[in-house]
Image (cartoon, grey):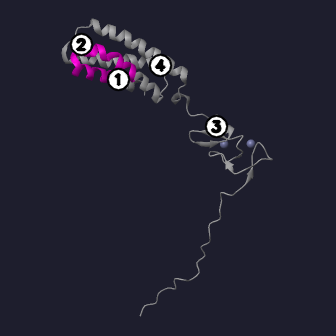
Amino acid sequence: MTAHPDPTAPSDQREPEPTDAEIFYCATHPKVETGLRCGRCDTPICPRCLVMTPVGARCRECARLKPLPMFVAGPSHYALAIVAGLGVAALGSIALLFLPPFGFLTLLLYAGFGLAVGEAVSRATNRKRAKGIAVVAACCAGIGSLAVAVAMLGPAFGLIGAILAAVVAWGRVR
Ligand SMILES: [Zn+2]
Ligand SMILES: [Zn+2]
């Protein structure tokens, strides 16, 4: 003999209240109804006050609080990064032309090349640690050294040298 509990027994579960139909008034425009809230401080905001950020809807106050400026680079920073990177890469490849290849250790020159390009880009951009800036540095170092590296070391080692320069430059900025 088994006694099952009655499965039809009434439970106190209720239908969840719909919360998305909530209406409140904008904090800055008390006459404007809205269903939006700032994702950071929960202030009610109307579409006019809403500022779309990469991390969601924000009120104007919160949108002004930008991420650390160290990680944000503007177009002028990219321009400076490219100029500095290409400039040093050009000077560096001329310098490499005058240096005799000395076997395997020549690769160290390319690491130094990458370091110089990375350092120049880093300084020109006020030490921004943005990903895009690191890409610029890596491209300038890699592409800038490739022709000279291939001419000096042959295609295989040349490519390794250029990649080494790019990786070192990337690491210097990132
Ligand atoms: Zn807010
Ligand atoms: Zn508003």
Front one among 104 and 161: 161
Residue extending farthest to the right is 31
Asked if the beta carbon under badge 3 is closer than 8 A to the nearest atom of ligand 1, the reply is yes
Q: Residue at x 42, y 16 (%)?
A: 85
**Mark number for residue 81?**
4
Mark 3 in CB contact with mark 2 (< 8 angstroms): no
Type of residue at label 4? Ala
Residue at 54% of width from left, 23% of height from top?
75
Q: Secondary structure at mark 1?
A: helix
- Sequence-first disc among 1 and 3: 3
Point out residue 56 in the picture as x, y percentages from the top left corner: 59, 43
Judge left or right: residue 159 versus residue 128: left
User: Are the residues tagged 1 and 2 within 8 Å (C-beta)?
Assistant: no
Report the predominant secondary structure element of the magenta stretch. helix
Question: Quick one: label 4, few (<14), some, or many (20+) residues within 10 Å?
Answer: many
Residue that mark 2 sits on: 152
Q: Which quadrant: the C terminus?
A: top left
Which residue is nearer to you in this view: 78 or 173?
A: 78
- The image quarter containing residue 151 is top left
Q: Which residues are magenta?
A: 138-167
Tell me if mark 1 has few (under 14), some (14-19) or many (20+) residues whose alpha carbon lies within 10 angstroms of its own.
Answer: many
Q: Which mark is residue 132?
A: none
Q: CA distance from mark 3 to mark 2?
A: 52 Å
Name the residue beneath numbered marker 1.
166
Cα separation, mark 3 vs mark 4, equals: 27 Å
Is 9 positioned to the left or the right of 138 in the image? Answer: right
Mark with earlier residue (1, 2): 2
Q: CA distance from mark 4 to mark 1?
A: 14 Å
**Mark 3 / mark 2, whichever is N-terminal:** 3
